[in-house]
Image: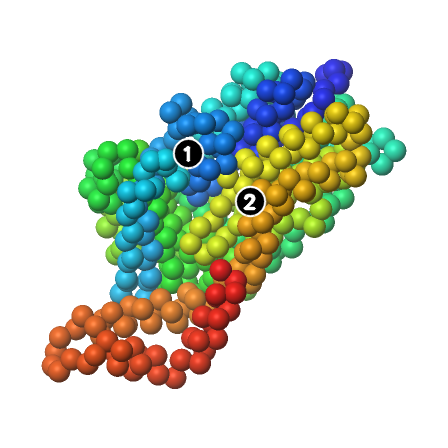
Amino acid sequence: MSEKFDVIIVGAGPAGSAAAYSLAKMGFNVLIIERGKYPGAKNVMGGRMYAYALNRLIPEFWKEAPVERKVTREKLTFQGEKASFTLDFMDEELREPPNSFTVQRAKFDQWFANKAVEAGATLVPGIRVDDLIWENKKVVGIVAGTDKIEANVVIAADGAVSLIAEKAGLKKFDVKQFALGMKEIIELPEKTIEERFNLASGEGAAQLFVGQCTKEIPGGGFIYTNKSSLSVGIVIYIDRLIKKKIESHNIILEFNTNPEVARLIEGGKILEYSAHVIPETSRSGLFIDGLLVAGDAGGLVVNSGLTLRGMDMAIASGVAAAEAVKKAAEKNDFSKEILSYYEELLKRDFVLRDKETFKKAPEFLQNEKLYTLYPDFVCRLFHRLTLVNGPKKRVFDEILEESEGKRIQMFLDMLRGMRAL
């Protein structure tokens, strides 16, 4: 290719497609390069997307997008050594407008990238970007094999382990800043899913698991309901996994055999297995002369304990990147000074505000007691409260007795949690 583009976007995931769609609608000549055979072929996520960011870009997108189910039921399960305790929350207000959906990236990413193409962007799949083109310390294009393609701006939206961000000289993530996500897609009939999760047609559930499911390693398990399958998986901190010398696939195997999980996936057929890394912190820099970094490539993920958000952050950052490019084009100046408007937009919107709000969460969530002491405490307490084998004590007395010797530590952890989450 010898044509020069206004913008080259590397990666056709949610961040890249959001940027491409926005820029194409503004009239920019946009090229999206995707290394997979098609958008979504190599993209992995747990399977849940919060609707807010995309609904601002494409109002009521769910009426045309290949979403699976709208999530109306939230569950949190504490797994002790011999018992489990589940909180089950259902809210009518989560139905309309929908708060979140379950999605499968192979379908969703193709739809979203095609929306960008319909708006005027050019999509080239099956191409790996190997390097950047520099001119006077400014990025002016990309190198893909023997092709050199120039542009005013490059947007790196190539995922958590971003080659483009690395080539741009932005600081690499340390292994301690990554979690590992592992997921299986398990096929089940629609009616079976709805019966087991107590759902109406088209409604979905998101169930999180904390405790023994991660073998005392910080992290958690999840089950998301699709139309005719379940997304079942584990998220776990990589450095702790290495330190414990536990094979990652053994953790998800044991998770599936836990009685609470086995009952929900019984009779299902495993359709696929995937794994990916999740950044727990943002990059120190999101822009340089001629280049912006969006989505997972910039570490724009927020884990608040109950919600792990990546897709909505990616979409919002892609839209912000497009707005920053628009301003730079108006001034015909693609220097980092002008492109810094991108960071200003992220701070104005929820992306960097939420990153700041929950900046202490990753460190707090690596407290091993959250996955050992507290799930077991909850299960043992409710064992006490439900067991009838003689005279009963008041609830408060049962709590005091079960927490004996742990109260100071529990109080301190509660304070840390309040500050972090």
Residue at x 85%, y 30% (from the top left corner): 135
Nearer to us of marks 1 and 2 is 2
With 155 as the anchor, is 77 left or right in this view?
Answer: left
Q: In the picture shown, does residue 178 fall above or below 276?
A: below
SS category of the residue bearing label 2: helix
Measuring 78% from the left and 31% from the top, which residue is drawn there? 334
Q: Amino acid at mark 2?
A: Phe
Q: Quadrant of residue 343?
A: top right
Which residue position holds label 1?
A: 104
Identify the image quadrant of the N terminus: top right
Q: Position of residue 238 (x, y in %)?
A: 54, 56
Instruction: State which quadrant residue 322 falls in.
Output: top right
Using residue 292 as the reference point, say whether residue 280 is left or right of it: left
The numbered mark, 1 or 2, whose residue comes first in the sequence reads 1
- In the image, residue 233 above or below residue 62: below
Which kind of residue does numbered mark 1 sit on?
A: Gln
Can you give x and y, in whole percent of width and height, for residue 74 in the image?
A: 33, 49
Work out whether residue 348 can be spotted. yes
